[in-house]
Amino acid sequence: MRIISANLQHGTPAKGVEPSQDCWRDLAKQFASYQADAICLQEVDFYQLHTGFTNQTRALAHALSQETGTSWHYRFLGFFAGQVVLGVRLPVALPKSVKTNLFNPFRADRPLVGGYGLGILTPHPVRRWVSAKLGAAPPRITINGWDMRNWSFYGGQTRNLLGAEVLTKQGSFLLGCTHLELGSVTAANQLGRSWQGLCALAGSATPVLAGDFNLRNDAVRDMFPYLTIADALTYPANQPSFQIDHVLAPPHCQVVSAENIKMPISDHRALFVDLNP
């Protein structure tokens, strides 16, 4: 199974790269050359003001369909619903009567007020889509000296797992995509829950977990010394010096090849992994 995991950073042009009129078409041409069975996206926007109200998962799926001549299935899952304006997420609260309405604007897979989160795309049939909540990091504050203007507060974002059971000629894979917290302790806890949950849901399918774990390679290997883990430097994009984007698979899977992909967008490089089940 060939997998691409890409943190898109909302489609922000890569350092030193001029903005493109159609970055999704450029990205689709690049990804199509790898003949991927599935693409996992992180930091992808859904109708956000600051990125032109674009459904970025759908935009890339449509560009891939045009580029490859094959229809790509896709799904978005939000970490939250609402707009981000000047670094503040809006709306911060809505009446309970609105939240419980049949047309819930906070529905994770298609929030009416916009959102931000994960996406999975594949040209193969999808037997089922699954999702799970991974929780949020506790609030924390960083104190830099006595001047409170230099202090920073971080509330911690909610994190989720999006999964798709993809049917390929090589077999059935339950592919999970996630983007874990910045704090290493919380990220490790979320990674453990992600892999355990994916294995519990897999049944006869082969579980594979991909995404931006915000954990370096040695930390992931310490947690799962028995798993197959792909190695390729992915961050920062201009001169990658370490890896925080990963693909995990059961021990019987073998990594045929792994490499990074320098994209026209993002501060990450995408991770391409060819797995032999």
Image (spheres, grey):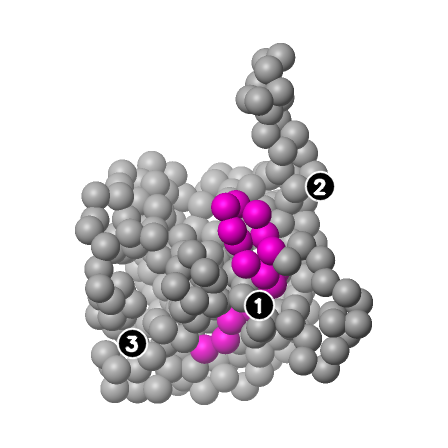
Q: Disc 1 and disc 3: Cα gap in Å?
A: 24 Å
Indicate the amino acid at tag 2: Pro
**Residue with the mark numbered 1:** 113
Q: Is residue 43 magenta?
A: no
Closer to the eye: label 1 or 3 = 1
Residue at x 58%, y 78% (from the top left corner): 129
**Residue with the mark numbered 3:** 63
Instruction: Determine whether the residue tagged by mark 2 lies in a helix, strand or loop.
Output: loop
Q: Earlier in the sequence, mark 1 or mark 3?
A: 3
**Percent from the top left, x then y, of residue 268?**
36, 48
Asked if the residue under mark 2 is in contact with the one under mark 1, i.e. CB atoms within 8 Å, the reply is no
Indicate the amino acid at tag 3: Ala
Q: Earlier in the sequence, mark 1 or mark 2?
A: 1
Residue at x 69%, y 39% (from the top left corner): 139
Residue in front for this viewpoint, 104 or 28: 104
**Percent from the top left, x then y, of residue 108?**
62, 69
Q: Is residue 160 above or below residue 14?
A: below
Instruction: Determine whether the residue tagged by mark 1 lies in a helix, strand or loop.
Output: loop
**Percent from the top left, x then y, of residue 41?**
44, 63
Q: Assign the magenta stretch its main secondary structure.
A: strand
Instruction: Determine whether the residue tagged by mark 3 lies in a helix, strand or loop.
Output: helix
How many marks are shown on the rendered structure?
Answer: 3
Query: How would you rate the neighbour count of disc 3 (Cα within 10 Å): few for under 14, some for 14-19, many for 20 or more?
Result: many
- Relative placement, left or right, of 247 versus 241 is right
Q: Earlier in the sequence, mark 3 or mark 2?
A: 3
**Residue with the mark numbered 2:** 138
Residue at x 45%, y 77% (from the top left corner): 74
